[in-house]
């Protein structure tokens, strides 16, 4: 199956990090009439659905933007024709005079946005989440202040610099000696929702070790080997999902399922025919289209999952 970009890994911008400490450049660029601003509030932004079926972010000029923390996201293009993009984290989203815009988050529209807009929203959501939860210095407890155009927080007392946090998490599609896929479900998910297994990488642990540990802890299955596929940011609030395909150990009961009852309420091996039949009957719901889990399932399945199964 031909590879295509993951929904939340797309971007067209140069992040232009060399400008983040150049206050004169940032101020001049912010005031430029061609600069565009994404307003974000609690992970949500205004979007508009176009007549030709696309979904786009509502971007304002800097003169229209409300007050709020300002983040420099990058530039698109070269030379005098380049466009700079900022985000403003506001208390609430501004209205839209034409009434056509609606409020949405990444989970709802991440897969429908174009490459530029997907990259803008992922970057802005990740920064807003981090700034909201890192107001104080972990060294001395004093307040921190934004710096480097939103990509650093500096302690107002000890001057220690804090950088945006990213938590690595492995997500894996494991198959057995019959080429069946291991999928599980959490009790809090909608009825019939199944997905790949996943978990956070622990300190002092390799990615491969994390894959084996998480699968065994959650489902009792022993992983014989695995290979890296791709990664995708997952700013809910600050993860980086690292996708793997793996194979279960066939000998000595290595494929026997025993769920932990905490992370998973149920897990089972699916053949392609069983997954297809379940989706067609509506008794099995696959992972979301913005998740790397869906791509892993499709790599095993051999083709994109049916449109009717999307949500």
Image (cartoon, helix red, strand yellow):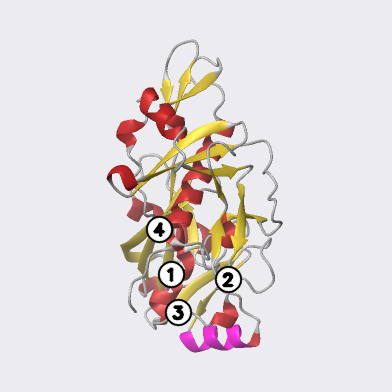
For residue 104, above or below residue 161: below
- Residue 295 — which label? 1
Sequence order check, earlier mark of 1 and 4: 4
Counting every numbered tag in the picture gives 4
Q: Which residue position is annotated with label 2? A: 194
Q: Which residues are magenta?
A: 272-280
Question: Is 261 contained in the magenta span?
Answer: no
Badge 1: how crowded within 10 Å, few (<14), some, or many (20+)?
Answer: many
Sequence order check, earlier mark of 4 and 2: 4
- Residue 304 — which label? 3
Q: CA distance from mark 4 to mark 3?
A: 19 Å
Location of the N terminus by quadrant is bottom left
| Callout 1–callout 2 Cβ contact below 8 Å | no
Sequence order check, earlier mark of 3 and 1: 1
Asked whether 128 or 207 is in front, the reply is 128
| Callout 4–callout 2 Cβ contact below 8 Å | no
Depth-wise, is mark 4 or mark 2 nearer the camera? Answer: 4
Depth-wise, is mark 2 or mark 3 nearer the camera? Answer: 3
Location of the C terminus by quadrant is bottom right
- The residue most toward the left is 79
């Amino acid at each position: 199956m031909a590879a295509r970009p993951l929904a939340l890994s797309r971007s067209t911008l140069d992040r232009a990090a060399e400008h983040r400490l150049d206050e004169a450049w940032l101020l001049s660029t912010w005031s430029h009439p061609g600069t565009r601003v994404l307003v974000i509030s609690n992970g949500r932004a205004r979007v508009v659905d176009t007549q030709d079926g696309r979904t786009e972010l509502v971007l304002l000029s800097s003169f229209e933007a409300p007050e709020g923390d300002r983040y420099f996201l990058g530039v698109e293009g070269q030379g005098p024709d380049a466009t700079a993009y900022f985000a403003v984290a506001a208390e609430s989203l501004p209205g839209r005079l034409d009434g056509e815009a609606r409020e949405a988050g990444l989970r709802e529209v991440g897969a429908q946005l174009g490459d530029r807009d997907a990259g803008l929203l992922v970057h802005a959501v990740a920064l807003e989440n981090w700034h909201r939860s890192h107001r104080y210095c972990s060294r001395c407890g004093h307040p921190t202040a934004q710096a480097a155009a939103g990509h650093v927080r500096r302690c107002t007392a000890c001057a220690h610099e804090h950088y945006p946090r990213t938590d690595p998490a492995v997500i894996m599609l494991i198959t057995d000696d019959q080429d069946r896929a291991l999928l599980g479900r959490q009790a809090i998910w909608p009825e019939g929702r199944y997905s790949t297994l996943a978990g956070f990488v622990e300190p002092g642990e390799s990615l491969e070790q994390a894959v084996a540990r998480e699968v065994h802890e959650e489902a009792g299955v022993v992983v014989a080997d695995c290979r890296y596929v791709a990664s995708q940011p997952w700013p809910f609030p600050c993860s980086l999902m690292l996708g793997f395909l793996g194979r279960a150990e066939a000998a000595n009961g290595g494929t026997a399922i025993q769920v932990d009852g905490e992370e998973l309420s149920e897990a089972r091996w699916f053949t392609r025919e069983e997954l297809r039949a379940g989706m067609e009957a509506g008794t099995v719901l696959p992972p979301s289209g913005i998740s790397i889990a869906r791509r892993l399932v499709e790599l095993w399945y051999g083709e994109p999952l049916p449109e009717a199964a999307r949500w």
